[in-house]
Amino acid sequence: MIDDDTQKRVLALHDLSCFGSCSLTVALPIISACGHDCIVLPNSLLSTHTGIEGFTYLDLTPQMRPIMEHWGRLGLDFDCIYTGFLGSHEQIDIASDTIDRLADFDTLVVVDPAMADNGELYPTFDEEFPVHMRRLCSRADILKPNITEACLLLGIEYKEGPYDKDWILMVLRELSALGPNKIVLTGVYFDDTEIGAAIYDKTTDEAEYILRGAIPGIYYGTGDIFCSVVVGAMTCGKSLLESVEIAVDFTRESISRTYNAETDPRYGVNFEAGLPSLIRRLGL
């Protein structure tokens, strides 16, 4: 059990999309369900995620640094700093400064370089954005890109799956050369029946794969769900392998729940109904 005396504090630095089950509307409930105090630093406010036409957008960059500096004056410390979608080069710089100001030796830094999918950079970003993102990735203890983001970070041509293990291992090694000791690569599959994640540890030069049955369709927000579970589980003291296994299962169950209900996948997946089982699996 996690009680008030041992409660961990996680800083989630993401956008806030009010509708569509992604970013902070995913990270906050999942990390809180894992028993942690989830502190948020929103970088933008959107009516919906960008996959839904006509969204409104408010840039919160002018507020980010004053918020972070106020926390510094209060002497707040964090067990984990978790960055997701960042909307500009300046926000990347602020995220790096936040790590400098608020992380100590024991703080776990997890970077999800949310900037691309399905072989393409998000249209809101210029071609230089991945170059700037590399600077933040070098600060991570754990880096969690998808295949598209990995290729952009490395400056290599995007490759569609199914993949072979030699190519995946090459990508994992090159990502670790950017700085992080551990890599979690999502969207990995070797045939059309299973999909999941690869884990790489630079100290052992070994890769492990956690794959589950594939479900047809494209579902928004699943990367945020997956990474939030990894962050929550690791902050509970689980190993990276255990955390990724829990995250793969939780994400797949959320997708399956949505697929069976035949709801519009643009609106996000039903992860909320799985939170009680996540709490039980973590032994809380």
Image (tube, helix red, strand yellow):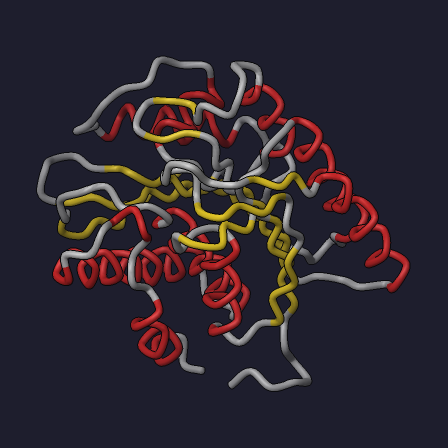
- Locate the C terminus by quadrant: bottom left
Q: Residue furthest front?
A: 54
Q: Residue at x 44, y 57 (%)?
A: 230
Q: Position of residue 279 (x, y in %)?
A: 39, 77
Q: Residue at x 45, y 21 (%)?
A: 152
Q: Residue at x 40, y 14 (%)?
A: 156
Q: Is residue 96 visible?
A: yes
Camera-nearest residue between 88 and 210? 88
Horizontal relation, residue 113 to residue 220: left or right = right
Q: Residue at x 50, y 50 (%)?
A: 17
Q: Position of residue 194 (x, y in %)?
A: 14, 45
Q: Position of residue 215 (x, y in %)?
A: 14, 49
Q: Is residue 181 visible?
A: no
Q: Position of residue 200 (x, y in %)?
A: 41, 41
Camera-nearest residue between 222 and 22? 22
Horizontal relation, residue 175 to residue 102: left or right = left
1 vs 53: above or below: below
